[in-house]
Image (tube, rainbow, N blue to C red):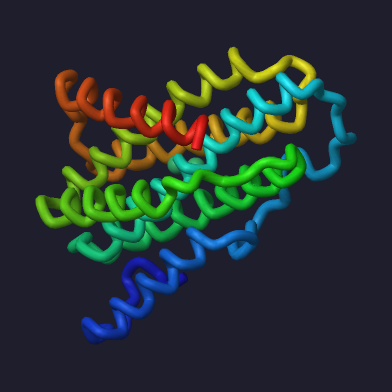
Amino acid sequence: MAHPTQKRPTLSPFDKFITLTDKALRTLSKGNTQSERASPASKMDAVDLDAEERKHSAGLMRVNHSGEVCAQALYQGQALTAKLPKVRAEMEKAAEEEADHLAWCEQRLNQLDSHTSALNPLWYGLSFALGAGAGLVSDRVSLGFVAATEDQVCKHLRGHLDSLPPQDTQSRTIVEQMLIDESHHAHAALEAGGVRFPGPVKAMMSIVSNAMTVSSYRL
Ligand SMILES: [Fe+2]
Ligand SMILES: [Fe+2]
């Protein structure tokens, strides 16, 4: 990754388009996301789940995977329109950590003999547009949007920890590590100058993310 103060080569609009398309296809196709950190569940013994528990765990991990697809798109969109190199570098670093989460959720879904959501291309497109739009307004709004989104994600992850079968320690340990990382992302975005979004905007975001949760759990 380029140092924040380092001048980066300017890409032509066509090069940018190719790079962004490549990122989108990698995120949306199976087995293409490399994780820097091994999954926290990688050294754990397989757990015995009955059919119902397996289905429920898979539904929740599919929601988490879709959330990570959104995170990739959001950060790519923001990095495209962020004005300050420091903010762009911050976005790219967070996107790398989100790539770990994306890979871990996909691995767990494979172990549960389940699949990622068919709606992911839709979530990717919407999140990319939102991220790019926030970046166009200002870097402070863009960072504030990260903080508000990550708060929302943390809320979902806490709910998943309450709902996941207690014996599914593999899924639980992944969600626990994600919760630590996401709350760090929220904190870092505010520290970097992100505006605190007002309650009504957060409530609106909550409605949108609940719609995503309900549909990705099933599809
Ligand atoms: Fe994440
Ligand atoms: Fe995050």
Residue drawn at x 18%, y 49% as measured from the top left: 134
Residue drawn at x 60%, y 15% as measured from the top left: 163
Residue drawn at x 50%, y 57% as measured from the top left: 96
Q: Is residue 90 visible?
A: no
Closer to us: 132 or 213: 213
Q: Is residue 174 visible?
A: yes
Above or below residue 50? Residue 97 is below
Q: Is residue 196 left or right of residue 190?
A: left
Residue 206 percent coordinates (x, y): 29, 24
Q: Quadrant of residue 196?
A: top left
Closer to us: 21 or 215: 215
Q: Is residue 57 left or right of residue 65?
A: right
Residue drawn at x 35%, y 66% as measured from the top left: 4
Q: Is residue 166 left or right of residue 73?
A: right
Residue 94 percent coordinates (x, y): 44, 51
Above or below residue 29? Residue 145 is above
Residue 44 percent coordinates (x, y): 85, 36
Closer to us: 151 or 168: 168
Residue 84 percent coordinates (x, y): 22, 62
